[in-house]
Image (cartoon, rainbow, N blue to C red):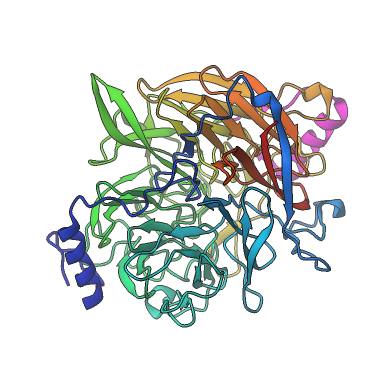
Amino acid sequence: MASKNGRRLRRSAHATTMLAASLLAGAAAPLLAQGKGDWQGYGRDESHARHSPLTEITPANVTRLRQVWSYHMRPAGTSGETIPMPDSVPAKFRSGFSASEATPLVVKGVMYLATPYRRVVALDAATGKERWVFQLPGNDQPSTRGVAYWPGGKGAGARIVFGGRSGKLFALDAATGQPAAGFGTAGVVDMKTPEVMNGTRGPLGMSSPPAIYRDLIITGSRVQEMPVKGAAGDVRGWDARTGKLVWTFHTIPQPGEPNFGTWEGDSWQKRSGVNVWTFVLVDDKRGIAYLPVGAPTFDRWGGDRKGKNLYGNSIVAVEAATGKYLWHFQTVHHDIWDVDLPSATLIEVRRGGRTIPAIALMNKTAMMFILDRVTGKPLYDVREVPVPTETDVPGEQPWPTQPMPVTPPPLARTSYAASDLVDGPPAHRAKCEKLVADLSVAPSKTFQPLRADSAVNFFPGSLGGVDWGGGAFDPHTGLYVINVNNLASPQQLARQPDGTWGMKAGYAYFLDPESGLPCQKGPWGELVAVNVDNGTIAWRKVLGKNDDPAFADAGVISAGGPITTASGLTFIGATRDATIRAFDTRSGALLWSSALPASNYGTPMTYQAADGRQMLATVATGGFAFQPATSDEVVAFAVR
């Protein structure tokens, strides 16, 4: 079936019925309307603005926040899964706990949570008491960042939906935790369909929850990074009642589709990567879904895929009901650095007396692009800037220019010189000097291509100046708040036995793995607020504390993100110092902090409990940023 622009859409008769219903519905009220006190999606709603309208917790009383309950996710008598780590990482960074990046949902007084112990649970949000537990079959595990909520309708009750690492899509009855009747086979749909598996047996699963658009479940996927051939990164829409496939959007354009031809020869065929491993966003009012697409495989070498490689590293807008292509904006051409596109948020920009619906997006370079979300056009100047192209890797053809926003400027460091090596305690500097010698670390400019004779110290590295935690948008102030890292990845390529090119020394970071302290001058971790109405940086604060007093003001590496509230507060865990903090959104002043059982590497959330209290909750496990997982607790706070 062909669309008006010639794009072939894989659409069943069921999909055609869904499209007709969508057109008839027109401006129907969104099915995702939620209570003021609820936190119904990972980012509270499908805009991923991570902003709550609640106002009970204020700058005046935030210091009275106290822990009121905790929940242990690990079942008694069991141990968790350890995170695979390089042999160079000390044994103390391995434990019997499992890491979680989840953010809980709360709907109508019930908290829903994916745990790293192969279980999804429902809790009383006021007390933390279990209501039900669903155990995944076999060795499967729910997506590490959480679940989604479909409110039901037309004879079907509310459902909790999530993907597993096995490639299964699950739907549970929200009231009981039992597999949802009528959805797939016993509440399960196999997402490893032949058209996405490309005739391979490669991995396909989900690390993030799906998006919900009315009666559709929209899924991205987690696929392999190597080898290059494997499961496609296509985005798909599924019927929330039956689990039937409604539409498929090819993240690598196929012959006859818009923008086909940006891959040299047949290099696009059976290519893996080019997937949405973070979060699909939805503008319910306009019926648009936004797909933040990551890098192609292999994401450090592109000699076998010359060209711009669409839709890699692009935000793609599609019709949410059908998957029809609307527009795209590519943030990096021919990615050979693994900068992906992990952060996207629907925002509003006030300009000239009007409010413009917009989208803010950042790849790992922490360059912030602010686009009109209807047209895809930049609202601030973006220029194609010449970048270095010199490399000694045969066959590589780096793209000669890259899009860079003039406003706002990059939020994180993007280059490195030898003079940037850290000062401070001689012992730490000596370890860093040894790292430079052992890995042949070389200086880098912005978008410096990788080499075979040295390890280009690329800033920001694989963890990113920003990563999947994303930011939070406060519509009252127009401030977009996000945590950033300044941490490089020394990356060197080597020819592989099959003639391709891969990492010589594996994945490395420019830090001492035992202490977790980076090897360049600070700041290392910051919290930054951007005024989206004019593109300026409103404030930036060092985020987190190091044990070593020599680096007390450098900040720490973080993962996860912040939230904002209508009372003017920004909450964030994310830091490796196992602390949750509250900042004044307007000024960036630190107002409150509390120790956690372990670091929160998801995003906190806030909700109104059944007893009327506004509560703050976070999942605190550790297990990231060169730390072990040392806890299994969900912790909730309230004002006392």
Image vertical order of residue 100 relative to residue 615, above or below? below
Query: What percent of the width, then of the height, locates residue 582?
Result: 63, 28
Q: Find out whether residue 432 is within the magenta segment.
A: yes
**Along the viewing direction, whichever of 239 and 532 lies nearer the viewer:** 239
- Residue 312 visible in the shown view: yes
Front-lying residue, 367 or 468:
468
Name the spot of residue 523 as percent of width and height, x first.
66, 25
The furthest residue to the front: 611
Residue segment shown in magenta = 416-441
x 40%, y 73%: residue: 196
- Taking the spot 70% from the left edge, 26% from the top edge, the residue there is 64
Indicate whether residue 171 is drawn in magenta: no
In the picture, residue 331 is in which quadrant? top left
What is the quadrant of residue 10 in the picture?
bottom left
309 vs 443, left or right, is: left
Residue extending furthest toward the bottom: 185
Of all residues, the one furthest to the left in this rendering is: 4
- Report x, y in % for residue 547: 82, 30
Quarter holding the N terminus? bottom left
Q: Is residue 95 above or below residue 186?
A: above
Task: Provide residue 307's location: percent of width, then percent of height.
Answer: 35, 53
Does 1 appear above or below 46? below
- Rendered-image quadrant of the C terminus: top right
